[in-house]
Amino acid sequence: VSGRGVGMDVVRSNIEKLSGTVSIDTTVDVGTRIDVRLPLTLAIVPSLIVRCGKRKFAIPQASINELVRIRAGEVTKRIEHVKQAEMFRLRGVLLPLVRLNHALSMASGETEADADQAVYIIVVESGALRYGLVVDSVADSEEIVVKPLGRHIQESTCLAGATVLGDGT
């Protein structure tokens, strides 16, 4: 037991030098939770650039399990509906689908599925959650520097940061 606080103090000091924070929450007979937060400006994240409508979004590759493209003629056969929820059967397992335009409350009609268009599904895994994210197209893979969001969209629960891509957008 002796000395554990000394090591954590070194960790805390180094993280604070980077303008980060460390918080420790201990509950007797339950456990300890250590929360380490680093500023997003330090993060260089390998990401997949996708399109939704006329906008581009970056999805961290660490969260991506696989990419699936459903051909135009197979969309109505491969995407099922269970109690008004869209589902995709991936190797025998039903995967709930989330349309990026709906999650971001983008204008409807920008990315609505059409039986005459291919559908791109990004299988995302985050902790115990696994779902398919439907986007208009997959653009490229890039390493991006994540910047904090501006004050006007800081309260967003769907966006973690912003970046300037290699083409200036």
Image: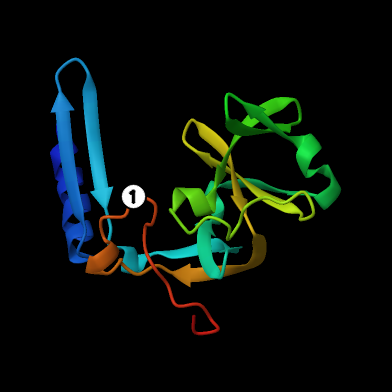
39 sits left or right of 158 in the view:
left
Residue 40, above or below 28: below
Helix, strand or loop for disc 1? loop
126 sits left or right of 120 in the view:
left
117 sits left or right of 59 in the view:
right
Task: Name the amino acid type tagged 1.
Answer: Thr
Residue 95 on image: x %, y %: 63, 32
Q: Is the N terminus in the top left, top right, bottom left or bottom right quadrant?
A: top left
Q: How many marks?
A: 1
Residue 105 on image: x %, y %: 43, 53
136 sits left or right of 29 in the view:
right
Residue positioned 24% across, 43% down in the render: 35
Between residues 83 and 71, which one lies in front from this camera angle? 83
Residue positioned 54% across, 62% down in the render: 47
Residue positioned 14% across, 18% down in the render: 28
Between residues 37 and 64, which one lies in front from this camera angle? 64
Name the residue furthest right: 73
Residue 84, above or below 144: above
Residue 37 on image: x %, y %: 26, 52
Between residues 103 and 4, which one lies in front from this camera angle? 103
Residue 125 on image: x %, y %: 54, 40
> Where does label 1 land, which residue?
157
Q: Quadrant of residue 111?
A: bottom right
Residue positioned 23% across, 23% down in the render: 31
Residue 1 seen in this snapshot: no
